[in-house]
Image (cartoon, grey):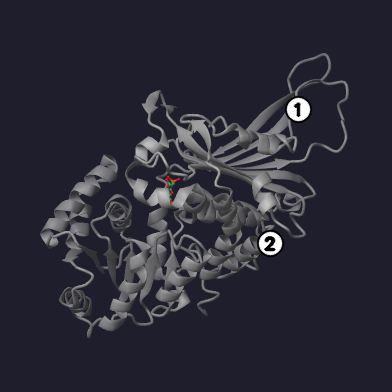
Amino acid sequence: MDPVTAPASATAALPERCDFTVFGGTGDLALRQLLPALYHRDREGQLPAEHRIIGVSRTPVDDDGYRTLVREALSTYVDAADLEDAAVERLLGRLHHLTLDAHEPDDWHLLGGLLKLGDEPHHDTVRVFYLAVAPSLFGPICDRLDQLDVVDARARVVMEKPIGHDLDSARAVNDAVGRVFEEQQVFRIDHYLGKESVQNLLVTRFANTFLEPLWSSHWVDHVQITVAEELGVGERGGYYDQAGALRDMVQNHLLQLLCLVAMEPPTYVGRETVRDEKLKVLQALKPMTGADVDRDTVRGRYTDGLVDGRAVPAYVDEIGDPDSTTETFVAIRAEVQNWRWAGVPFYLRTGKRMDRRVSEIVVVFKEPPHPMFPHAEGTTAANRLHILVQPDEGMRLHLTAKEPGPGGIRLRPVSLDLSYATAFDQRSPDAYERLLMDVVRGNPQLFMRRDEVEAAWSWVEPILERWQASGRRPRPYPAGTSGPTAAGTLLERDGRSWQETDQ
Ligand code: BG6
């Protein structure tokens, strides 16, 4: 089967041997997400028999020291019920660590030596290079790998966001990595694409028929996409204050969710076909003029408040910079200018320190075209499909029903609920588990292609520019609320309101 038509499934063949090198191997991402994810997959017997994991960092630890660090990380970040001694020992046995000073050629040669060890009998080794480090290091690391002659046609590089902070810098990062790796060898992570419920969105849309005839401006009134967090910026203030919510969440996660809702059915769900269709959505987003930005976007920033009954400081106090102008909340009214979606607003909203942690997509359908029960009592509401991404995963369809009882018709909203936790009695894997295995298997479907990343930056950039030129500070909202009131006004102006889920 040709690689383009080959199934993009989790059952694709594993290489016999994989060397998985993590730059930033002792960092938070590696210890909190990557190694626990590899542990789970290893426990399920899904890592190649000869799979080595090589942590690279400036931390002065040897292999044993690294194993101790990873053992502690597993006991902290993996549920106790999932920790099995034999599986932990097996994963630890795969680990190596190299202390590397990026400017020290001898250190790099150690890495070259380790990677080439046993090269002869194992010439089919897949080498994965995971860049869990600052983006300014992406290009220099790739150049070094090239000089070491360890990048062959089977090698893969994984890039964590941020990929640039605007279009030019994203292009520069992509160019630098692209000088060493071909595009099909580059895996740009957006962990939202690895979430079970997000993948299920594709299945719901394309493995069923009932939605498709309704999925357009004929029957859809508007779409809402919310990613709300209770957490503040925590230890990541340095990065976040340079980024803000638009770069950190909208440019990637929210736009990817929008793409999956709005994309056309591809000819089949495959490696490039989904990415091709997502790109078309990004290219169809109505470009924002300065006046559009003023009217259709809201920037907010949390002040102190109560989250889950706990007092939390204001953003500026959390990062210790009263002059910061960074936003921690964004709401945007976007439009997809194509045949299917003309005139249907897509309202996006994301924020930190909100009243609860919830990510969901709400598709709000139009009201019935004619009042069929003019004399009925009770209340009706337009049909809504809530696609619940987290914390609970599932779907909820809001309908209108007749309240049981004699003496006329009384209408009442009811819901049809599908909870994945109840429907599937099994552990839902973390996004990184799926994504890391896709890297090992060489399946790029759930990763962002260069043209997607750059199209997303092209749409976002006029918003960033206008905000900067206006010099306005973000609107305040108390921590523990649903954001600035202007975010509500954005919809009220159109005769609509945010649909909050009773998760
Ligand atoms: C990351 C952002 O990409 O996504 C973080 O950088 C954010 O700021 C996180 O907290 C949210 O991810 P999740 O999976 O917890 O919704």
Above or below 142: residue 396:
above
Rounded to the nearest angstrom, the CA distance separating label 2 from label 1 is 34 Å
Who's the residue at 24% across and 48% down the image? 74
Q: Nearer the viewer, residue 36 or 301?
A: 301
Is 378 left, or right, of 104 in this rendering? Answer: right
* The disc label shown at residue 284, or none: 2
Q: Amino acid at mark 2?
A: Ala
Q: Is residue 206 visible?
A: yes
| Rendering coords of residue 103 (x, y %) | 22, 72
> What's under tag 1, amino acid-wise?
Thr
**Is residue 188 toward the left or the right of residue 263 in the image?**
left
Residue for point 67% across, 38% down: 490
Q: Residues within 10 Å of mark 1 (few under 14, many from 20)?
A: some
Q: Tell me where residue 324 appears, x and y as whole percent.
A: 43, 44
Q: Kindly identify which residue carries mark 1.
A: 380
Q: Quadrant of residue 133?
A: bottom left
Q: Check disc 2: other Cα within 10 Å, few if <14, some if 14-19, many if 20+.
A: some
Of labels 2 and 1, the one closer to you: 2
Where disc 2 sits, the SS reads helix
Direction from residue 347 to residue 370 in the image, left or right: right
Q: Which mark is residue 298?
A: none
Q: Nearer the viewer, residue 305 or 402?
A: 305
Q: Nearer the viewer, residue 422 or 52?
A: 52
Q: Is residue 412 left or right of residue 3?
A: right
Residue located at (49% from left, 70% from top): 171
Tell whether label 1 touches label 2 (CB within 8 Å): no
- Which numbered disc flags the more N-terminal residue, 2 or 1? 2
Locate residue 344, reporting x and y percent. 74, 49
Q: Is residue 251 above or below residue 148?
A: above
How many numbered marks are there? 2
